[in-house]
Amino acid sequence: MEIRLAESYGFCFGVKRAIKIAEDLKDATTIGPLIHNNEEITRLKNDFNVATTKDFQEFEKNPTKKAVIRTHGIEKQDLEKLKNMDVEIVNATCPYVTNPQNIVQNMSKDGYHIIIFGDEKHPEVKGVKSYSESEVIVVANVDELKNHHIPRKVAIVAQTTKKINEFNKVVAYIVERARETRVFNTICNATFENQDSARELSQDADVMIVIGGKNSSNTKELYNISKINCVDCYHIENETELQKEWFKNKKLCGITAGASTPDWIINKIISKIKEICV
Amino acid sequence: MEIRLAESYGFCFGVKRAIKIAEDLKDATTIGPLIHNNEEITRLKNDFNVATTKDFQEFEKNPTKKAVIRTHGIEKQDLEKLKNMDVEIVNATCPYVTNPQNIVQNMSKDGYHIIIFGDEKHPEVKGVKSYSESEVIVVANVDELKNHHIPRKVAIVAQTTKKINEFNKVVAYIVERARETRVFNTICNATFENQDSARELSQDADVMIVIGGKNSSNTKELYNISKINCVDCYHIENETELQKEWFKNKKLCGITAGASTPDWIINKIISKIKEICV
């Protein structure tokens, strides 16, 4: 049986970069978990002494610590407080998130009303929003816009993980009502690249293994996409869940993984499949 | 029988303004016909000595003349040539057309690639395009965009008479490909206001008279819209076409007119209907 990895899978560029930063730094503390994967958090703790804190204000008690800002970024005012604490700050905010932060800051300075297409409670959106110098409208869909008066001059950015079609619906609604709409397409294609690759691979595979947290929504999405083309499709978190019968009489085993799944977990699973199938 | 005019009909604001300018000026020459209505052109000639020339270079032969620039505007380089001729220039370019001219000029200066959604051969679009300081892409629909590479920084305007839904399709295509899209909604609602009013009135009327040139596309559109709600619908150019039987046993006669139909033609028709129905 051949085992083939999807062309694009697992960690995105920003997450890989943030983990590398934390590893290189050693003995650092990240503000919020660097990634939604407990095994990876444990590995970082064991191998590189990377701790995690929920609240950046903990640094006040121990200013000698090194603080790592995760890919989502943090709110501008929190970053400023942190700077005043005399902590060593290493900013691992994904460049694809720094970009909308800068846009929102500059556009609000230039007198544009800021609209963010995203989830108001998501840390990335909270961070981006905090860079505006004027009031911000955050909407999760076009229907929510209907409660708002649309100003004459609007600048709009999207949360990096949003879908372009939904973004364009929001843009169309604004264009119909505003005089000028400055649209910054800040959507990152990483999630969609993983999905496209899963779609492609599942057409050829006769068994698909989708690796990732059971409550990871992007892993579930990969599973649903793969299932359409390949009925024998399994969503697992680690190698202990693998069953020998899944691979019986199969020619091609496709593998993909959610955005929070580290390569070492994927590699462990591949080794185990090889072992099973001997 | 009651006769009721549509809430919005006939000349738009820009055309009314241009005619007023030509009338006030007297003995002027317009560059291209001020309006697509021969009877109105004749009236302006007879009552205010307003002539029409196809080619602005005719002014060179007679620089003492007064030149009126019509609502569509003219190309920037032509305006400059005209200025060098020492002609008295009165600019009746519709403010809704001057606006995209200015936008295109400023945005191209600021390094944005200009895309115009409109008909490349239309005088308004030719004029707007001429204000760009860099190359311009003109597309009549989203499919035409597929032949073009979409630059990173785009500014887009629309021909004033285009439909917002089609404009948004073009915008969506660009937003998916460009980093920043500056969308200026330069569509004028006048045409659509006439259409909305015709739709509304034709629901109540049991006979509809639609007035305008037989080859005027916006008048034909008013006819098609009215016909949906009111089967007894007639498209006429002048009062000689009216037939008594159209109004037999009718309670409400609705009246609308295309964007090139002057009020005095509409009034003549209303008088004639009243005469017929006595």
Image: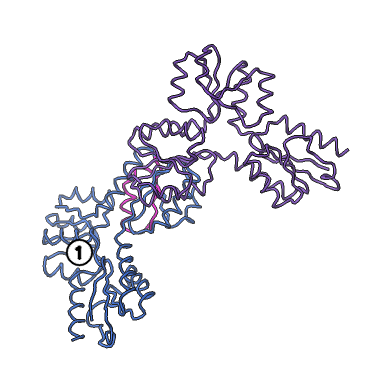
Chain colours: A purple, B blue
> Does residue A17 appear to the left or right of A139 in the view shown?
right
Q: Quadrant of the N terminus of chain A?
A: top right
Q: Quadrant of residue B5?
A: bottom left
Find residue A182 and report its horizontal and vertical position in percent: 39, 42
- Residue denoted by label 1: B52
On screen, residue B239 above or below A260: below
Find residue A144 and report its horizontal and vertical position in percent: 44, 47
Span highlighted in magenta in the image: B112-136
Find residue B244 and report its horizontal and vertical position in percent: 25, 87
Q: Residue at x 46, y 54 (%)?
A: B169
Q: Quadrant of the C terminus of chain A?
A: top right
Q: Residue at x 39, y 32 (%)?
A: A132
* Magenta-drawn stretch contains B115: yes
Foreground of the two, A268 or A140: A140
On screen, residue A104 above or below B55: above
Q: Element at badge 1?
A: strand
Q: Residue at x 28, y 49 (%)?
A: B99
Category of crowding for the residue at label 1, using alpha-carbon neighbours closer than 10 angstroms: few (below 14), some (14–19), many (at least 20): some
The residue positioned farthest toward the top in the image shown: A64
Chain identity of mark 1: B
Number of numbered tags placed on the structure image: 1
* Magenta-drawn stretch contains A204: no
| Three-letter residue code for mark 1 | Thr
Find residue B111 and report its horizontal and vertical position in percent: 38, 38
Whether residue B67 is visible here, answered yes or no, is yes
Q: Residue at x 72, y 48 (%)?
A: A202
Whether residue B152 is visible here, answered yes or no, is no
Foreground of the two, A243 or B154: A243
